[in-house]
Image (cartoon, rainbow, N blue to C red):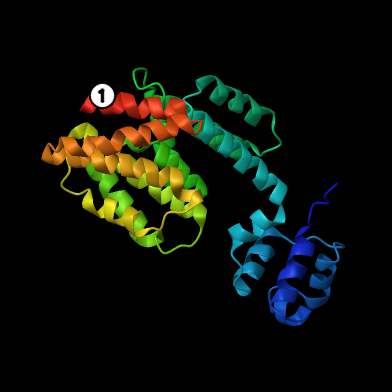
Amino acid sequence: MKVKMTIGDLLKQYRINQNKTLQEFAGNIIDRSYYGKVERNVHQISAENLINLLRYNQIDATEFIETLDQNYQSQIQIQRKIMEEAYYHVDKDKLKKVKLMITESELSEKDKEIQNLIADGLLELLNPDKSDQKIREEIKKKIFEIPKFNSTKFMLYCNSMRFYSLANNEAIVRKIIEKYQVRESMLVKKSLFSLAINVLVLSIEENKFENIDFYIDFANKVPTNPDLFFYKSAMTFFTYFIQYKKNQDKSALQYCDPIIKSFCLVGMPEYGGELQKFKDKYK
């Protein structure tokens, strides 16, 4: 059984990695002798002193907390992965089961609220004819309460783009891509692709293509690899479909059908079916 890492354990790990003595790490934030006992888990450290200590040693507080309890974060990531798979397989029942899993989990009430909000947003997207304005407003409010675009904010916003105007989405997504496209994190890259794909979808639905080149250029510049294959495939589908819509170029449609077929062949027939329905509706 994995023993949970304590605050003292992790502080000691950061101090050793920075090659600092107890006094150098504690600075004027906390008495050296008292701090040494914090590392040995004899004394506790106040939240205020902990935050000041992390800031003094240039340690990201979010990273510290996430590292402190990897098992806790794993619960969150597993739940979100199941939610994503359920959404892409258009499985409403599975999404409802995830909500039950969240309720019975050991997450904090705040994290349960956010996880349930993400699940509700995905269910809302799968029920376009039965929109719940209360859910939409809750998600929009929560997005603006999160100070920076971490993984939670990415997912909440990506799932709620239909709740904003096309013009607002174009402006928001462009800023996000410009700021985060240099990141090496695969999670960030997948998030950026999801946002770009959603902009293309919304542009097709409204038949407005004046500003889509930026998003297509961004996707084309990112090398294809196994982790991004799904996103690149979906992006390619919508890019060719836009070529058809903009220029009435029927030859572009011949590239859409193989992509739909490939999704069906590799075990995502529901998503392939959604692309086929989208193509039929807007052709």
Residue at 63% across / 39% down in the picture? Answer: 78
Placement of the C terminus among the 4 image quadrants: top left
Q: Between residue 51 and residue 87, name the one nearer to us.
A: 87
Q: Is residue 167 left or right of residue 89?
A: left
Q: Where in the figure is residue 172, as x and y percent of width and height?
A: 31, 50
Few, some or many residues within 10 Å of mark 1 (<14, 14–19, 20+): few
Q: Is residue 26 left or right of residue 159?
A: right
**In the image, farthest residue toward the left:** 247
Q: Where in the figure is residue 152, as x and y percent of width and height?
A: 51, 45
Residue at 59% across / 27% down in the picture? Answer: 99
Q: Quadrant of residue 26?
A: bottom right
Tell me if residue 210 comes above or below residue 25 in the rendering.
above
Q: Between residue 82 and residue 117, name the one nearer to us.
A: 82
Q: Between residue 126 and residue 38, name the one nearer to us.
A: 126
Q: Quadrant of residue 214?
A: bottom left
Residue at 33% across / 47% down in the picture? Answer: 196
Residue at 42% across / 35% down in the picture? Answer: 262
Q: Where in the figure is residue 4, as x and y percent of width and height?
A: 80, 52
Q: Is residue 12 visible?
A: yes
Q: Is residue 150 visible?
A: no
Q: Is residue 92 left or right of residue 167?
A: right
Q: Where in the figure is residue 109, as x and y percent of width and height?
A: 63, 36
Q: Amino acid at mark 1?
A: Asp
Q: Is residue 181 left or right of residue 74?
A: left
Give the number of marks: 1
Q: What SS does tag 1 mark?
A: helix
Q: Between residue 222 and residue 43, name the one nearer to us.
A: 222
Q: Which residue is under mark 1?
A: 280
